[in-house]
Amino acid sequence: DSGVTQTPKHLITATGQRVTLRCSPRSGDLSVYWYQQSLDQGLQFLIQYYNGEERAKGNILERFSAQQFPDLHSELNLSSLELGDSALYFCASSPRDPGYEQYFGPGTRLTVT
Amino acid sequence: GIQVEQSPPDLILQEGANSTLRCNFSDSVNNLQWFHQNPWGQLINLFYIPSGTKQNGRLSATTVATERYSLLYISSSQTTDSGVYFCAVGSYNQGGKLIFGQGTELSVKP
């Protein structure tokens, strides 16, 4: 158990819908990262938050957004969902950034039908 | 950006055999991690090893940062070692993100 929790574990929804994925980092970690794992793109960085502020953005679509709350948990919002958004979404946390070991949550498997 | 290449892409072993997985990266890094993704999709941290050598049971890893490669050794493999092994790197000038290789899919047969 990495200490990072993610909910829900599985999500099945229809095209055009909006979903929210939730992540709680390890106790004491200030940095939260979101990654997407799809069959064609592999594991890709989406976005990072550090102590409530956006720190870095990767290949994140405009339809996606995230935030980190004062208690340090984070949410990833995906809207106007398309079939191609079906993927495994991971959250990771680290004490600070950069250069610290990242610990990954169990992931949320999103299926868009 | 930094490119990460892993080899081999696939590996089939008999239980008890040893193996070496390789990760090459194209620029200097400050973070290098090895992960095992099990059949349920979980990413398990194996090593945080931006340089040097570490051992944990039957697994060990070596990173030669000056030559931009890392090796993961698995000895006396077991069926539970099956899954995908990922190498991921990060550098200060690219923020904290990890850049992943495409993985090595390992299958250990009984």
Image: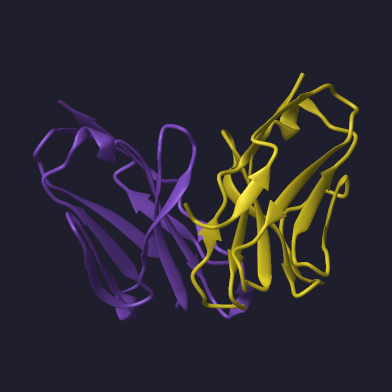
Chain colours: A yellow, B purple
Q: Is residue B103 above or below residue B105?
A: below
Left or right of B24, for residue A67: right
Left or right of A99, for residue A36: right
Residue drawn where x is 83% and y is 64% of the image? A69
Q: Quadrant of residue B64?
A: bottom left
Q: How many marks?
A: 0
Residue drawn where x is 42% and y is 68% of the image? B32
Q: Is residue A70 above or below residue A3?
A: below
Q: Residue B59: image x %, image y %?
A: 21, 56
Residue at the farthest top position: A113
> Can you say which quadrant of the picture contains the C terminus of chain A?
top right
Q: Quadrant of residue A10?
A: top right
Q: Residue B13: image x %, image y %?
A: 17, 34
Left or right of A91, for residue B15: left
Residue drawn where x is 57% and y is 51% of the image? A105
- Nearer the observer, A76 or B18: A76
